[in-house]
Amino acid sequence: MNCRFNRILVSRYLDGQTDTGESEKVRAHLGTCPQCNQEVTSWQSLSGVLKQMPPAQVSADYEVRFQKRLAEATAQEENEGYSVLEGIGTGIREGLDRISQILAPVPVLARVAAVTLVCIIGLGYFGGYFYRPGLPVIISTKGNVQTYQGKGWQEARMDSVFKEGEIIKTGKDSFIDIELKKGYKLRLKENSEILAGKLIRQGRNAGTQLVLNRGRLLVDIDAQFKRRGKEFKIDTFAGTAVAHGTEFLVDVDPRNKRMWLGVLEGAVGVSGRIKTETPMILVKAKEKTTVLPNAAPTPPIPLTAEELDILREIERIGKLLVSLVLSDTPNRVKELLSSPRFYAYGKEPQELQKILKEAIGLLNEAIRSNDRTKHMQVIERLEKAIQEYPAPEASPQLLVFVGAYYEWLSLHNKAVETFQKVLSQYSSSEVVSLAECAIGIIEEKTGNRRLAEESYRKVLSSYPASLEISEAQNGLERLTSSVR
């Protein structure tokens, strides 16, 4: 459409959001412009078709994966100025061919996917929707993570862009991973806060400046990022760290008024915030330093074995391979047992990704054909993945999914057996409270009142802060009232 008429106004007109004067203006233009008239007629026709379609349940990971591909495409250096519309056009051609391979147990119908993509194109077409290329993207979150961009604190969203001036803070037992493709990966640990001061990917002033107000930040810098002369700097109240290498950790403790830095690989230059001129010291691999306010950094000394283990978490940034699709409502266990879902978004190890893709592709086939044999093959592949590639953050969630999957197939004994494995093998409060409650629900469903009551009471006594408390209390009340 080459017409220069206000596209945003046309988009609002299609959505019924224009006032009388604006509507008249659009209708008058449509009467004189065949191009716009044909375009609007097409959209109105599509809207009519959509209204007649029954509600569809798309897979929970659809938007996550679509936005991730979109963000990755716009971040490519060689495509500076790359348009979202071009990326979506490519996505339609590739996405419709591969829609059955989307990583979710509930398959997405090609018809629904096509409509969703077309609607997104429409918004971009009329609204001029573009991402700034080359910005860091949030690739995973856990727990309570919030962002601030001048309009109040909001929950951090997967695949959203981390922008200059934005603040991110994490709560207890939480973290967030951020990635700049071909640049760096960051993990902000629990009870931490960071500000993006400078995020420039291209040009003479290219570089990154982050302000760590409190807490712990893990950093993994791509070798290409430094070779191309881009500076990576972290400022704190006590001092500044300038990266000359790849992997390091900065810990800021405002209460004790100190900055701690440890390097796993490469080297980092560190200076203090003092008035007298002092040279920057170089902290090399497996060394650490401490900086106090108004003082020079301490001379580098070797990291302890325990500190080295802490720094090795850097190697896991962005590699959380599996995430259960769970709501945060009190009845989430029942939801999981009735419709188990998960999505995979890690990149390594490749062999594990291959197994997961095979399993989920087969799962989509099994659901479409209602083939129980294929369902069992899916479980075999997932159990193989858990056994051969045990990842601390991924395996518990995969095993919980397998237990829910058994229950979905009405294999109650296998489901209980699997959830008992979760209880015996893992200690994460989230998965064990969920597994214990799931056992209670299954035992109650199959008439094993005593075992059901035991599981519900364990949830109440051992996990009083969990979301499963409500389900356990309701379960006990049902068992008690049925006896009366």
Image (cartoon, rainbow, N blue to C red):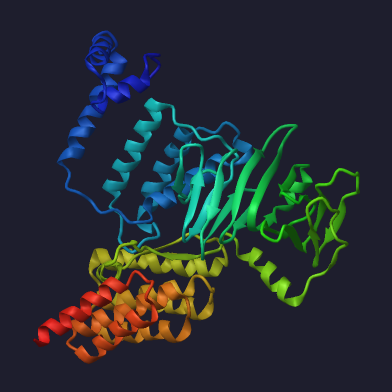
Above or below — where is 339 with respect to 257?
below
Q: Is residue 306 visible?
A: yes
Above or below — where is 218 with respect to 228?
below
Q: Residue at x 46, y 79 (%)?
A: 384
Query: How many numbered marks appear?
Result: 0
Q: Nearer the viewer, residue 86 or 460?
A: 460
Q: Is residue 381 visible?
A: no
Which image quadrant for residue 409? bottom left
Q: Nearer the viewer, residue 15 or 75?
A: 15
Residue 26 picture location, percent across and down: 27, 14
Q: Quadrant of the N terminus?
A: top left
Q: Residue at x 27, y 82 (%)?
A: 440
Residue 61 picture location, percent across and down: 38, 56
Q: Nearer the viewer, residue 192 or 404?
A: 192
Q: Residue at x 37, y 63 (%)?
A: 325
Residue 322 picture location, percent across and down: 46, 66
Q: Residue at x 26, y 66 (%)?
A: 367
